[in-house]
Image (cartoon, rainbow, N blue to C red):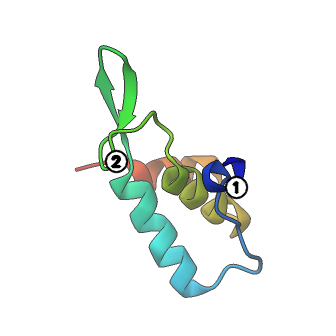
Amino acid sequence: MSAVLADFPVLTPVTDEELLVAALAVRVHVPEHWPQGPLCRSESVPYPCRLARWGRATLAAAGLPDEAVAAVAVVS
């Protein structure tokens, strides 16, 4: 069961396609505040969900600083 809950692997070097998907994952899988705590807006599971963690880790592996990753996650 732990393999099901494990994080998705971050492959290096990061390709342009992976960067696009990771940016989309970070943008879509954002927290929403609920009485039981922050939940992923897309999946309604405790935030950060697996895709949010993978997206952030992939962007970090590509060399984006934390500030740039946070800017990608901002919902307009």
Out of 51 and 57, give the one closest to the viewer. 51
Residue 29 drawn at (x, y percent): 39, 51
Give the left or right position of residue 21, taking residue 19 as reference.
Answer: left
Dot 2: few (<14), some (14–19), or many (≥20) neighbours within 10 Å? some
Give the left or right position of residue 27, taking residue 17 as reference.
Answer: left
| Vertical relation: 32 (above or below) 34 | below
Which residue is drawn at the image coordinates 52% and 85% (left, top)? 17
Residue 62 drawn at (x, y percent): 68, 70
Dot 1: few (<14), some (14–19), or many (≥20) neighbours within 10 Å? few
**Snapshot quadrant of residue 60:** bottom right
Which residue is drawn at the image coordinates 76% and 81% (left, top)? 13
Q: Amino acid at mark 2?
A: Glu
Measured Cα–Cα span from mark 1 to mark 2:
19 Å
Residue 51 drawn at (x, y percent): 50, 57
Residue 20 drawn at (x, y percent): 46, 77
Q: Which residue is mark 2?
A: 43
Q: Which residue is mark 1?
A: 3
**Snapshot quadrant of residue 16:** bottom right
